[in-house]
Image (cartoon, rainbow, N blue to C red):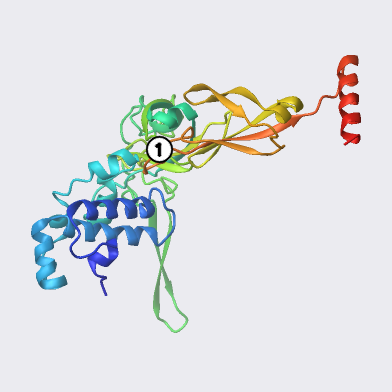
Amino acid sequence: MEKDYYELLGVPRDADTKKIKDAYHRLAMKYHPDRNPSPDAAEKFKEISKAYAILSDPKKRANYDAGGFEGVKHYSQEDLFRDLDLGSIFGDMGLGAGSIFDRFFHEQPRGPVRGQDLYINVQVPLEVIAKGGKEKIRYSRPVACSTCHGHGTKSGKAPAVCPSCQGSGRKVITRDQSGGDQRHIRYQQLVTCPDCNGRGTVAEAPCEVCRGSGRQEKFEALNINIPAGIDDGTVLRVPNHGLPSDQPGGANGDLHVHVYSAPDNRFQRRGADLWRIEYISVEDAVLGSEIKVPTLDGRVKVKIPPGTQPDEVLRLRNKGLPKFRGSGYGDLHLRIQVQIPDNLTGKERELYEALRALHKAK
């Protein structure tokens, strides 16, 4: 049984268009198959997308409010999603909108099988994640050989079909045998075609560049859009930049870019928050001080309160990363470590001895 569309999106029946869009945006972030590998995510994504397609359209929503599922059952999948603008929802998420709906809701045209998807990991500097923008990525993938056009032949043309097996790579061998009771027995056996060794094509001299494979390794550079504050592990999909199809005329697969924060010797990232260890002297911990610390916006002054203890954490509000698909910024946390001197001068030792004696006299 289908679930009520308002319940699926978690909105009241009198919700306005903005509330419906915000609710769908939040759920789509959670269940989009390019972000959520769970087997149930794809089906959930289909459900909430259908609910949004109906409730975001005034006419379809009115039909649903008046007649329930019966009021909208005459809409085909094409009718539901033809005019649905998803660019404002998925564009700034770095996720695909069009092809995901083609996969889920539209009939796939018959034709050559598309190539497999390609998955790579990319590390992005914190400065880019903080502001968002373009980031150049470099990767390699096999593409059709430019010399033989992917056929693997020296002539650059598709090899001729084997006349013996008509391109199937298999042949039926028939044997006649007479039985002991005068019966005539006919045996048929499916075997690999001996003329083409199962290839289905006539042997031809291989391409000298790709050695008959029909593929070349190609290094590519792409500029991809990094949304501000993007979470570690988020997957960005780049259509048509995956592996080539094994069949002539087939479309390429997609490139899936798993984005991670690049290591940074200044900070450790935890979500939208940044963490940093600051070392101070004993006297600064006791008396208090003022230090300069780096942030993603430059260096800032931070007051060390008197009596600061080792491992105490000072928080600098809104000095972290922007919250991905949220409002505001994370914080910068400074974990204070007190440096104990291990090589005292004579004067320093004298002063520490005096200080110890003063403490003992209390």
Q: What residue did someone put label 1 on? A: 203
Residue nearer the viewer, 156 or 354: 354
Q: Which corner quadrant holds the N terminus?
A: bottom left
In percent of width and height, residue 190 lies at: 41, 61
Residue nearer the viewer, 120 or 219: 120
Q: Left of 40 or right of it: where is 347?
A: right
Q: Name the residue located 41 percent from the left edge and 82 percent from the top edge.
A: 182
Q: Name the residue located 57 percent from the left edge and 26 percent from the top edge.
A: 302
Q: Which element is circle 1 on? A: loop
Amino acid type assigned to the residue bearing label 1 in the image: Ala
Name which quarter of the figure residue 223 lies in. top left
Q: How many marks?
A: 1
Q: Which corner quadrant holds the C terminus?
A: top right
Q: Residues within 10 Å of mark 1 (few under 14, many from 20)?
A: some
In percent of width and height, residue 99 lies at: 27, 46
In percent of width and height, residue 137 lies at: 43, 28
Outermost residue to the bottom: 181
Q: Relative to 192, does residue 196 appear above or below in the rendering?
A: above
Q: Name the residue located 17 percent from the left edge and 59 percent from the top edge.
A: 55
Q: Can residue 4 be seen in this view?
A: yes
Q: Name the residue located 69 percent from the left edge and 39 percent from the top edge.
A: 311
Residue nearer the viewer, 192 or 116: 116
Q: Relative to 227, does residue 50 appear above or below in the rendering?
A: below
In percent of width and height, residue 31 lies at: 37, 55
